[in-house]
Image (tube, rainbow, N blue to C red):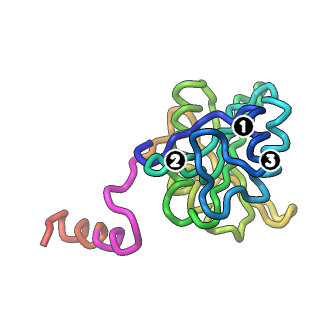
Amino acid sequence: TLRLLLYPVDAASAGEVLAGRAPRGMEPAPGYPSRFSLDLMAVATNGSAPGDVGPFFIMRRADHALIGEIGCRVDPATGTAHVGYTIAEHCQNLGYATEALCALLRHLLDDVGVRRVEGESLAGHLASRRVMEKAGMRLAGRRKRDGGRVSYEAVAGAWSHDPPLLVGRRSRRRQRHRAARGGRRG
């Protein structure tokens, strides 16, 4: 992506993170690794499982800061990929998760040939839900059990993501204002 690089997590690099070091060529961002990252690295030291796409380290291009991970497991019977991601707390609310998720969705739907990508979140975890919505995923369902979970999906042939030209709350207001005036500036 413009701001991020995604690198596959292998057993050796997972071991480095578990030992308190960043993999070669990366610097940990403040707050990295999260508890989720450590759990993921413990699993990754055993190598990839069949159907895994990733996990990938999410690294900021500008300073090679390691800010999180993203990946998925594909169910071959249904052609559905179940995606998950995490971003270090210090790097949240900057659009990194959305950018990484868009890149993974594009790869899964266009290159891997997955038919459907699914993501899940607690209903009250609004930040995670917004990431999926901004990445072009659509609400697919709600469950009251399991703490009130919601699922989002992106379907091959129907998913598209056109990133906004401007970002941020004030910028979105300006876009709506311009659209109401016929797109004129001024």
Residue 177: x %, y % from top left: 26, 73
Please name which of the two marks, 3 or 2, marks the residue nearer to the observer.
Answer: 3
**Could you tell me which residue is drawn at 86 percent across and 61 percent down?**
146
- At mark 3, the secondary structure is loop
**Could you tell me which residue is drawn at 53 percent across and 66 percent down?**
93
Please name which of the two marks, 1 or 3, marks the residue nearer to the observer.
Answer: 3
Q: Quadrant of the C terminus?
A: bottom left
Instruction: Please say if the residues under marks 3 and 2 sit with CB atoms less than 8 Å apart.
Output: no
Which of the two residues, 2 or 119, is positioned nearer the viewer here?
Answer: 2
Write down the residue under mark 1: 13
Tell me which numbered mark, 1 or 3, is placed earlier along the sequence: 1
**Could you tell me which residue is drawn at 72 percent across and 32 percent down?**
10
Residue 16: x %, y % from top left: 75, 42
Tell me which numbered mark, 2 or 1, is placed earlier along the sequence: 1
Write down the residue under mark 3: 19
Instruction: Please say if the residues under marks 1 and 3 sit with CB atoms less than 8 Å apart.
Output: no
**Could you tell me which residue is drawn at 84 percent across and 66 percent down?**
147
Q: Residue 2: say if magenta.
A: no
Say what amino acid the circle numbered 3 marks.
Answer: Ala
Mark carried by residue 64: 2
Instruction: Give the extent of the magenta segment.
Output: 162-174
Q: Is residue 85 left or right of residue 35?
A: left
Say what amino acid the circle numbered 1 marks.
Answer: Ser
Q: Is residue 32 left or right of residue 130?
A: right
Say what amino acid the circle numbered 2 marks.
Answer: His
